[in-house]
Image (cartoon, grey):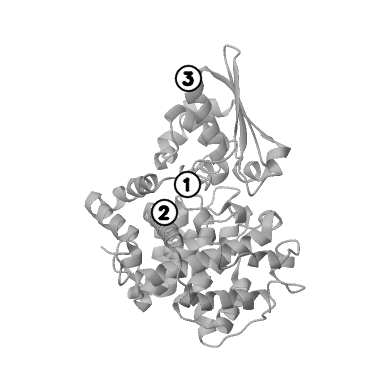
Amino acid sequence: MFVSEKLGRFTAEFHTATPSAEVIHHAKRALVDWYGALLAGYPMAPTPMVENALALELDQGKARLPLGRRAATRAAALINGTASHTAEVDDIYREAIYHPGAPTFSAAMAVGQALDVSGLEFLKAAIAGYETSTRIGQVMGRAHYQHWHNTGTVGTFGATTAAAYLLKLNAEQTANALCLSATFAAGLQQAFKMDSLAKPLHSGRAAEAGVTAAMLAQQGVISSLDVFEGEVGLGRAMSDGPDWSLAFDDLGARFNINSMTFKNHACCGHTFAPIDGALELQTRHGIAAEDIERIVVATYAPAIAVAGNPQPVTAPEARFSIPFVVSTALLHGSVRLAAFDAERLQSPAIRALMQRIELQVEPSLDAQFPGQRAAQVTIRTKDGKEFSMLQPTRKGDPDMPLSDTELNDKFSELALPVLGANKSNTLSTALWNMDTESDLSALGKK
């Protein structure tokens, strides 16, 4: 069987599977995290621009945007997929270098609302989408990430799988949907090397493309079934000809949704180990920011390539700047959404501390990427003292997870400015009980 056929069979057969309580619980954790990211990003550019651009596809259909506006299915997937990746607070599967929640849940919600599915079926669709896409991303590996933005490429498969599951496509149709979506998969890292609003659109487009591919396959549109492993297929065109058999290790027995990273900072995940290490050193040794002479951050190469911007000007640039977010953390104690307000972006104190930060590639840590995201942080003070530590992982990674309470607190922090306290609390309860909901009416509700 081709790769697409094996993955198609897994998704089709998942209808009769009964996920464990643990898997369902982790799916609800991912849902809570995704919906917080969705609400946070909905008012932020470029989401309102996307909504305006798609005005002819709104106020119709059964899908919903976060504040209740009706939308056609594909438009909802695109808008919600964009919104939930905009604030840079969405989840990560580190081994695939990929944010699964934004494209996968956005596609699942759009199709699920259109079809009036139950909460449990919605969660199962997302579980299947996470599983298929994270395995594809892990196989594609670091060679793929050299040029491509995995949330735009790999995310297409998460969205396709979730949509195919809810449309009840059979194994053959699902395989064709995955192969069709492979031709839609895109998203270049160069798109966010400068000031840009393109990055969130990668997630939105992945969600929309996945929904489209599943709908086309439902109508009988077929594609080359060897698109993953073929001579000019995805693996060779966008990676280094990887071993696809690795995608099927423990498939159906081990679920990657149990091993998600949930962000503890509102910025690029590559910056988290430096932030955590710097804050730990500051707390442990009582270091005042004004007493710092020099900071050296030694970490893995992609962190510096993606998030090494030395002089960010705009909020999108600052979210991908280790010097900016580390300086912000040391001066303000955290890196939340407020860190990227105009006042902070222009702060003389932050700018001065940034000039004292040096970034280095540490070969031993680089060799551990992507399975481990670590940083060696050294702070030298003006009185000649030097403090150093290895931050081996990130707060929020599966080996240092956010608790359910911490995750819910994060949701509340993101939801309150958009919904207010009462609606936020009501929605939180519905999300944590999604497996018992008869439909998705709690989502996208005014």
Q: Amino acid at mark 1?
A: Lys
Between the residue at mark 1 and the residue at mark 3, the CA separation in whole angstroms equals 25 Å
Residue 153 can be seen, yes or no: no
Question: On the image, numbered disc 3 is attached to which residue?
Answer: 286
Between the residue at mark 2 and the residue at mark 1, the CA separation in whole angstroms equals 9 Å
Judge from the rendering whether residue 190 lies leftward or rightward of residue 26; answer left or right: right
Snapshot quadrant of residue 338: top left
Q: Secondary structure at mark 1?
A: loop
Question: On the image, numbered disc 2 is attached to which residue?
Answer: 33
Q: Position of residue 171 (x, y in %)?
A: 56, 81
Could you classify mark 3 by the number of other residues whose Cα lies within 10 Å: few (under 14), some (14-19), or many (20 or more)? Answer: few
* Count of number-bearing discs: 3
Q: Determine whether 104 is above or below 317 in the image.
A: below
Judge from the rendering whether residue 419 lies leftward or rightward of residue 254; answer left or right: left
Of pointers 2 and 1, the one earlier in the residue sequence: 2
Residue beneath the point at 43% across and 38% down: 339
Of pointers 3 and 2, the one earlier in the residue sequence: 2
Q: Amino acid at mark 2?
A: Asp
Q: Secondary structure at mark 2?
A: helix
Q: Secondary structure at mark 3?
A: loop
Front residue (pair 268, 121): 121
Cβ atoms at labels 2 and 1 below 8 Å apart: yes
Residue beneath the point at 60% across and 61% down: 187
Could you classify mark 1 by the number of other residues whose Cα lies within 10 Å: few (under 14), some (14-19), or many (20 or more)? Answer: many
Q: Position of residue 435 (x, y in %)?
A: 35, 66
Between the residue at mark 3 and the residue at mark 2, the CA separation in whole angstroms equals 33 Å
Residue 274 can be seen, yes or no: yes
Q: Position of residue 32 (x, y in %)?
A: 38, 55
Question: On the image, numbered disc 1 is attached to which residue?
Answer: 263
Judge from the rendering whether residue 303 lies leftward or rightward of residue 45; answer left or right: right
